[in-house]
Image: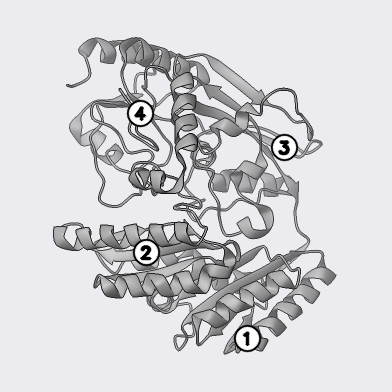
Amino acid sequence: MALAPEVLTRLQSLLDSDALLTAEEDLIPYAFDGTAALRVMPGCVVFPRSTEQVAAVLKLANETATPVVTRGSGTGLSGGSLPVPDCIVLCLVRMDRMDEVDRANLTLLAEAGATTQAISDAATAAGLFYPPDPGSMKISSIGGNVAENSGGLRGLKYGVTRNYVMGLEVVLPDGEVLWTGNKCVKDVAGYSIKDVFIGSEGTLGVITKVLLKLIPKPETKRTMLATFAQMDQAAQTVSDIIAAQIIPCTLEFLDRTTIHCVDDYAKIGLPRDCEALLLMETDGAAPVVEAEAARMQEIARKNACKEVLVAKDEAEAARLASARRTAFAALARVMPTTILEDITVPRSQLAHMVRFVAEIAQKHNLRVGTFGHMGDGNLHPTFLTDERNEEEMHRVEAAFAELFDEAIRLGGTITGEHGVGVAKKKYLPRFADAASLRVMRELRRLFDPKGILNPGKVIDMPE
């Protein structure tokens, strides 16, 4: 059933004249996000410019039981911002103001539509540092980062988005505006409500402003690229670096397939005669960086590293780092459909899991490239396929089911940073126990009794 004309009329009265899309050709770009092979047409798209407009839209939606799906830049990889039929897509990209950079308290206040890159740039301009750096940071929005609890290449040393959220402005499903958190380093007054919304994937409320913690900018950085003849050697290098009490800011890996795709695409000049590549970066005070870089090179060579390339300057460091940052784009050029997945296992199980990915791909006659955050056990097996080939897509689905089951068996999880959304919803009961699932449902019912926010995502709700 299409959106009622009365709802559209009332929406138009609540918003700016150019803030409502209803024509089919205008809605198509909002029918999908970064998740492959998933598309659903919304009923309309609205572009609020203020928290007050968001509240008004949600109040109307709650009154009329109209589903609402919040969206930022649409870079999500689990279908979290995928519309449901005839819903209102609440797109926050026009709410992108940077309200305050407070150098005295090391905080930054921004609207939800501000890009991660803009926040990083604002912090840098103030002589400070915002560490979370998801692969899509140039276009992903901070509201989406918080809703998905996004990670990034620097997660091993600096943590993920949750570690930098000090406060949130959230509009609840009935239109009420809630503020939680503050600039205080310590605050244990009552429940930590902000942590409920971080990673909630738009199912409990709409995040409209984010208060972020900033930190002092590292004095210097050293970037290195190490190559290995065997994946086990790279994995052991990672384990030995951590055992040596070195926590690099970046410890990433690419497998052979990904290395070749990246070099074909970006022309970086990567060594192609290896099975694994490690991007290693250390940052901090200059003497510490020099000592850690030397020790990391020593550990890599002890594990039969073929070669270590050390960046001579910032430009070369950016070039070497681009080997990892362009991995997804490089793989996406190979086939019409690129399905980038996200599993995490204990670091001690990394080598086994990478081998298992290759075995499963061979078993199901699929092409896969694997890369990821080896320092924190987060892998991105990426299947190169064609969604028009239904039989092959069934094999891809069977392969992923086996990968998720193996990750769980090893003590890992079905997602480290992409979220559950709709793509992994059916796998959540394999990971979470009955009590956890019950609590999730009760929490969601408490916040959103009419079930209007992002219905069908994360967990199924009984009628």
- How busy is the neighbourhood of tag 1: few (under 14 within 10 Å), some, or many (20 plus)? some
How many numbered marks does the figure carry? 4
Q: Which mark is residue 264?
A: none
Which callout, 1 or 4, points to the residue nearer the camera? 4
User: Contact (CB < 8 A) between labels 2 and 1?
Assistant: no
- How busy is the neighbourhood of tag 3: few (under 14 within 10 Å), some, or many (20 plus)? many
First in sequence: mark 2 vs mark 3: 3
Of 218 and 229, nearer the camera is 229
Of 127 and 430, nearer the camera is 430
Relative to 77, does residue 462 appear above or below in the rendering? above
First in sequence: mark 1 vs mark 4: 1
Q: In the figure, residue 320 lies in which quadrant?
A: bottom right
* Residue matched to label 2: 382
Of 127 and 184, nearer the camera is 184
Three-letter residue code for mark 2: Thr
First in sequence: mark 2 vs mark 1: 1
Q: Which mark is residue 107?
A: 3
Q: Residue at x 34, y 29 (%)?
A: 455
First in sequence: mark 3 vs mark 1: 3
Element at badge 3? strand
In this rendering, would 445 be left or right of 318?
left
In this rendering, would 339 be left or right of 310?
left
Which callout, 2 or 1, points to the residue nearer the camera? 1
* Residue matched to label 4: 461
User: Contact (CB < 8 A) between labels 4 and 3?
Assistant: no
First in sequence: mark 4 vs mark 3: 3
Could you say where residue 179 lies in the image, as x and y percent from the top left?
A: 62, 21
Q: Is residue 90 visible?
A: yes
Three-letter residue code for mark 1: Asn
Q: Tell me how far mark 4 sits from mark 3, CA to CA.
A: 37 Å
Q: If the image is split into quadrants, where does the C terminus sit?
A: top left
User: Contact (CB < 8 A) between labels 2 and 3?
Assistant: no
